[in-house]
């Protein structure tokens, strides 16, 4: 499914199949991990590197409100989505966002704390 977010056209893909962080572009043989390329968070989704741009969550309004409140404590852009695209919450990881903060927030959004929500990643090709 494609979603137009202002001037940015993104693919919204579920990570239910499991995204794993990309291996650093070095001779490092340590386990795979997320990496940044200046301002991008690159993860591996179904064997392909993709840029993690943000997330879209749908579900019960009280849980969406809690997610929006959690996002408000970060430097990320967060917004309620109204019909026909909602109800939902969109969170965009701003360029230059801290890698650990991005991974932590995305992981938290998919945790038991927000288990009533369907969370989908907004990604674009890394190449």
Image (tube, rainbow, N blue to C red):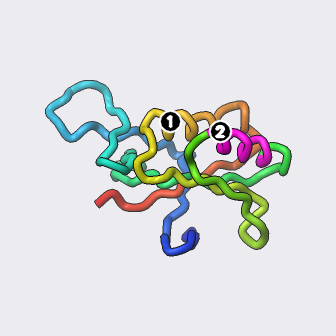
Say which element carries label 1.
Answer: helix
Determine whether 16 is above or below 83 in the image. Answer: above
Question: Are there few (<14), some (14-19), or many (20+) residues within 10 Å of tag 2?
Answer: few
Residue beneath label 2, please?
73
Magenta span contains residue 69: yes
Tell me the mark number nearer the camera, choosing from 1 and 2.
2
> Residue 104 vs residue 42: left or right?
right
Q: What stretch is highlighted in magenta?
A: 64-73
Mark 1 or mark 2: which comes first in sequence?
A: 2
Residue beneath label 1, please?
101
> Residue 12 vs residue 109: left or right?
left
Q: Residue at x 37, y 50 (%)?
A: 40
The residue nearer to you, when weighing 8 against 21, is 8
Quadrant where the N terminus sits is bottom right
| Residue 122 position within the rendered picture, expressed as x and y whole percent measured from the top left | 52, 57
Q: Quadrant of residue 108?
A: top right
Q: How many labels does the image show?
A: 2
| Residue 66 position within the rendered picture, expressed as x and y whole percent measured from the top left | 77, 41
């Amino acid at each position: 499914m494609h979603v137009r977010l202002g001037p940015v056209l993104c693919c919204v893909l579920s990570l239910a199949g499991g995204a794993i962080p990309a291996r650093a572009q070095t001779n490092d043989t340590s386990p795979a991990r997320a990496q940044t390329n200046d301002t991008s968070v690159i993860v591996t989704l179904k064997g392909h590197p993709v840029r993690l741009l943000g997330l879209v969550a749908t579900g019960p309004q009280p849980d969406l409100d809690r997610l929006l409140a959690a996002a408000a404590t970060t430097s990320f852009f967060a917004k309620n989505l109204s019909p026909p695209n909602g109800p939902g919450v969109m969170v965009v990881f701003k360029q230059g966002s801290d890698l650990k903060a991005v991974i932590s927030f995305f992981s938290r959004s998919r945790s038991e704390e927000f288990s009533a929500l369907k969370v989908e990643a907004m990604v674009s090709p890394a190449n």
